[in-house]
Amino acid sequence: MLARMAPKRNFSNGFERNVERLTEMLPLGNIGFAVIGLNTLLYGMYLMWPPHNLFSYMNNFTFSSYGLHKGYLWSLFFCHFAHTSFFSYLLDSLIIGVLCQSLGMMHGSVFLAKGMVLSMALGSLLLFTQ
């Protein structure tokens, strides 16, 4: 009964099938592990990037109006996972991991993935309209 009262995010059936298939590949079906993996990948790239060329990392993987004017549209996606300090990386990964685990148990991984896609799209739209 409570499941019928939960808010629905209307995506196509194909999208839901693909998300379900992808989450089955993740450990425990937790999409938070994928987000933590992207956080780790981009923070590791930040640490290994040559210091004399750090501006190119910032233009490509964090949000900047210069990068958008140059056509780096992928920065609208990667800016959600890029970190420039260990504390922000650790805190973000910890919060995402714990929240994704508990919300995935309550509502399912497809619901959680839809919420993440919508929040990233809305965040990117707000950054783009600056």
Image (tube, rainbow, N blue to C red):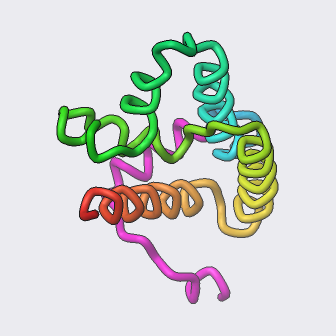
The span picked out in magenta is: 1-23
Is residue 81 inside the magenta stretch? Answer: no
Q: Quadrant of the C terminus?
A: bottom left
Query: At x 59% / y 19%, what residue is drawn?
Result: 45
* Residue in the foreground of this view, choosing between 25 and 93: 93
**86 left or right of 53?**
right
In this rendering, the count of numbered labels is 0
Q: Where is residue 97 in the image (x, y as percent from the top left)?
A: 77, 49
Query: At x 33% / y 35%, what residue is drawn?
Result: 74
Query: At x 75% / y 60%, what residue is drawn?
Result: 99
Seen in the picture, residue 2 relative to 68 is either above or below; the reply is below
Which quadrant of the view contains residue 107? bottom right
**2 left or right of 67?**
right
Seen in the picture, residue 107 relative to 40 is either above or below; the reply is below
Q: Where is residue 13 in the image (x, y as percent from the top left)?
A: 35, 55
Seen in the picture, residue 6 relative to 87 is either above or below; the reply is below
Which quadrant of the view contains residue 28? top right
Query: At x 48% / y 59%, what residue is drawn?
Result: 114
Q: Is the magenta stretch mostly helix, strand or loop?
A: helix
